[in-house]
Amino acid sequence: MTYQYQEETEVLLEEVVDLDSSDLIVYNDDVNTFDHVANILVKVCKHSTEQAEQCTLIIHFKGKCAVKKGSIEELKPMCEAILDAGIQAAIV
């Protein structure tokens, strides 16, 4: 009779966390139109038209979308501009 043994090995996974990277989240509401949100994303976040349209669809169907990633210092004026346009947004 032959026996086979399995050796258990613990593997440590290193998670890289970028403390200087945050997300600018835009939330869905029942007030703003797709066109308004898309236009603001093009203007404020410098999205292409296609990218802005895709984000608006995600916002509509999922309730929110991370529209930009960057440092808090970079995202703060963008968030304020989106909020000033009447769209719900936050940095997380």
Image (spheres, rainbow, N blue to C red):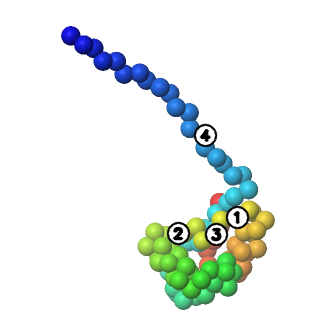
Q: Residue furthest front?
A: 2
Q: Secondary structure at mark 2?
A: strand
C-alpha distance separating marks 4 and 2: 29 Å
Seen from this angle, which residue lies furthest right?
A: 73
Q: Which mark is residue 14?
A: 4
Q: Which disc number belongs to residue 47? A: none
Q: Nearer the viewer, mark 1 or mark 2?
A: 1
Cβ–Cβ below 8 Å for labels 3 and 1? yes
- Secondary structure state at the residue bearing disc 4: loop
Name the N-terminal-most of marks 1 and 2: 2
Residue positioned 53% across, 69% down in the render? 64
Q: Which mark is residue 64?
A: 2
Q: Are marks 3 and 4 in contact (CB under 8 Å)?
A: no
Task: Give amino acid for label 4.
Answer: Glu
Q: Provide residue 2's location: percent of width, then percent of height.
A: 24, 13
Q: Is residue 18 left or right of residue 64?
A: right
Q: Position of residue 63 (x, y in %)?
A: 49, 70
| First along the sequence among labels 1 and 4 | 4
Q: Nearer the viewer, mark 2 or mark 3?
A: 3
| Neighbourhood count class around disc 3 (C-alpha, 10 Å): few under 14, some 14–19, many 20 upward | many
What residue does disc 1 label?
Answer: 70
Q: Are marks 2 and 3 in contact (CB under 8 Å)?
A: no
45 left or right of 1 in image? right
Is label 1 in a helix, a strand or a loop? strand
* Residue 4 location, quadrant: top left
Q: Amino acid at mark 1?
A: Gly
Which residue is identified by label 3? 68
- The N terminus is located in which quarter? top left
Q: Label 1 neighbourhood size at 10 Å, few (<14), some (14-19), many (20+)? A: some
